[in-house]
Image (cartoon, coloured by chain):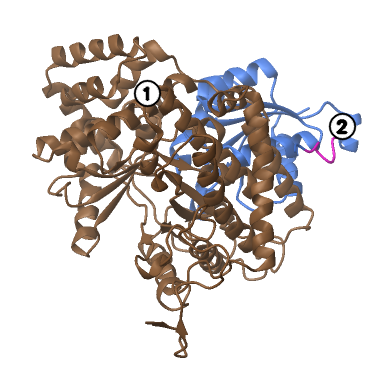
Chain colours: A blue, B brown
Amino acid sequence: MSEPPADTSPSPDAEFEAPIRVVLAKLGLDGHDRGLKVVARTLRDAGMEVIYLGLRQTTDSIVAACEQEDADVIGLSMHNAGHLTLAPRMLQAVDQAGLDVPVVIGGIVPADDVSTLIDSGVAAVIGPGTSAEEVVSAVKAAVDRQPDAQ
Amino acid sequence: MVESMSGIPLDPFYGDELEPGEYPYTRGLFSTGYRSKLWTMRMFAGFGTATDTNARFHALLRAGGTGLSTAFDMPTLMGRDSDHGWAIGEVGRAGVAVDTLADMEDLFAGIELDKVTTSMTINGPAAIAMAMYVAVAEKNGVGRANLGGTIQNDILKEYQAQKEYIFPPRPSVRLVTDLVRFTTAEMPRWHPVSISGYHIREAGSTAAQELAFTLANGFAYVEAAVAAGLDVDDFAPRLSFFFNAHSDFFEEVGKYRAARRIWATWMRDRYGATNPKSLMCRFHTQTAGVSLTAQQPENNIARVAIQALSAVLGGTQSLHTDSYDEALALPTEKAARIALRTQQIVAHETGAASVVDPLGGAPFVEWITDEMERQADEIFDHIDQLGNGSMLEGVYAGIEDGYFVGEIADAAYRFEREVNAGRRIIVGVNEFTEGDDDEASLLSVGHETEELQLKRLEKVRGERDNDAVGASLAALVEAAGQPDLNLMPPIIDAVRTYATEGEIVAALETVFGTYVENAVV
């Protein structure tokens, strides 16, 4: 009953530059992983290297994965209204580790909180109903925005 | 005499082949349907401290309610105390925080537990929540035999879909079975497991997968309880189910009808049940949270109404309708009221409750019911083979080899690709998108709860007899090492010393271990 992804070929850009390496994780106790798994396949189909950490991660485990995997961007999925507490902790942990890795957040974030998160340094917030193309371009834009991006 | 709006007298049901109330119950469990008893409008709610939720319970009871439904917060559902590192930002947010018996005492203060029924939606630490409920009742002079209600206690779907697991599958199923044995012997009014497809569907499965995985889990619990020495007819009448009501109307109706037929057939023919109540698939339904859109959220009211109607025409015993703003946040009071009103409109204005199984006999409805059953049968065959003739072993194997999560993720991705390619229209999301700009007013929960709860926990830890706590936890660890012992009594002993949920879980983890999912995409 499983169906192979319809499009596994890398995007044209990928022939000329190293693929974007993205770490995807759920931070804390929130177990809603449907969206994150769809995003993982979407980014992989767009030619990115996806390091899928899955559930029950901590800021430390995510930072460690970024260092080990030389990640270009972190994608966090949040559905439990903990984003205003957890996102700043993630940014701080990335900073303290001396990493220049942008953080993109997906999931359920009320509009008022989106600007708070962006102001605090989150690169992008991707809400429900976002198309695959928009997800891919948000991640690409987040990586390009880093000052020392290759 | 029941009449249509125009005064036409209506029979309780129509058609003369299979009648509602007849085995295998495809057309419904009872010949009188909602005429004798309307479905229960059981709305799931709760957040903040135990005291906050207790005030809500009292308000509900004053308003004429007789049933309570408890939502716990994430740390409680995961068996972690409010001061655990993982709990930061989550205490009291999506439900009520319960760390010790003291919180459970506050939660049910002033409520006559022999007069109400309580539903507790909790799985990994279900045995601990059950123990606390029993301890509170007995402290208030109500014997456990007089307690009525339901605890979800369905751990298998946690590994497959909802992911709120603590221990590995086998010791977790032992805890489920211990609770079933305990209530079967001592709490005849209690429903010890609510076998839930809701979360499987929300995680992305198809309707047939929801049907098949859920019933397979049900068969697995039956096999586990029989293996523990129970007679199938002793506990099966107290099992119940929980399904999703999604948007494809006729497919959903077919799913409910197929569920009743499959359960009855398997319970009689494979598990040898003879009590008609053992054969009856009773179920609660909730509309599909995942179908709600953040765009043009008011459109969700229409979605919920149609989904609710499918559950009612499919014969549900109880129903929760989602609020239109739930793709954005926890519901506001107004949104929750509209959701309840939607059920009341279906119940009292549409005539949907007048006639049992009014869609039965329609060629398409009968065909899609058969098709749901056929697809479910294919899945049962696969699971049965995985388990070499045991559904319980098959479910364990499917959890271990990633079968369930893989099937669900494939179906979810297929759906998203269809939406993305425009082959499937979601109104307001990928078509008819003008009018997206309105801002909804949303509920937000503050940080005060977390601070209050942390102080509360510190106070309880400071006032209790720590030697008694230690002794009770040591006795629990000792009992956990002996698979034949029922763990409910030592867990009740432990909660009575005000051992925290997290301490009890940690004690059990020393014997059972901790489950870590093999993350696959």
Q: Position of residue B38 (x, y in %)?
A: 37, 66
- What is the chain identity of the residue bearing mark 1? B
Give the side of residue A97 with respect to residue A141, left or right: left
Q: Position of residue B255 (x, y in %)?
A: 59, 53
Mark 1 lies on residue? B229
Q: Which mark is residue A14?
A: 2
Give the answer, above or below, for where B147 lies relative to B456. below
Q: Quadrant of residue B424?
A: bottom right
Q: Which numbered mark, 2 or 1, is in the foreground of this view? A: 1
Does residue A4 show up magenta in the picture?
Answer: yes
Q: Position of residue B319 (x, y in %)?
A: 42, 58
Q: Which corner quadrant holds the N terminus of chain B?
A: bottom left
Give the side of residue B273 with respect to residue B370, left or right: left
Give the side of residue B86 with respect to residue A123, left or right: left
Q: Position of residue B56 (x, y in %)?
A: 24, 54
**How much space separates mark 2 and mark 1, taking CA atoms?**
61 Å
Q: Quadrant of residue B442?
A: bottom left
Q: State which region is magenta.
A: A3-8
Extreme residue in the bottom direction: B6
Question: Can I make out residue B89 in this image?
Answer: no
- What is the chain identity of the residue bearing mark 2? A
Residue visible at 34% across and 46% down in the picture = B446
Give the answer, above or below, for where B425 lies relative to B6. above
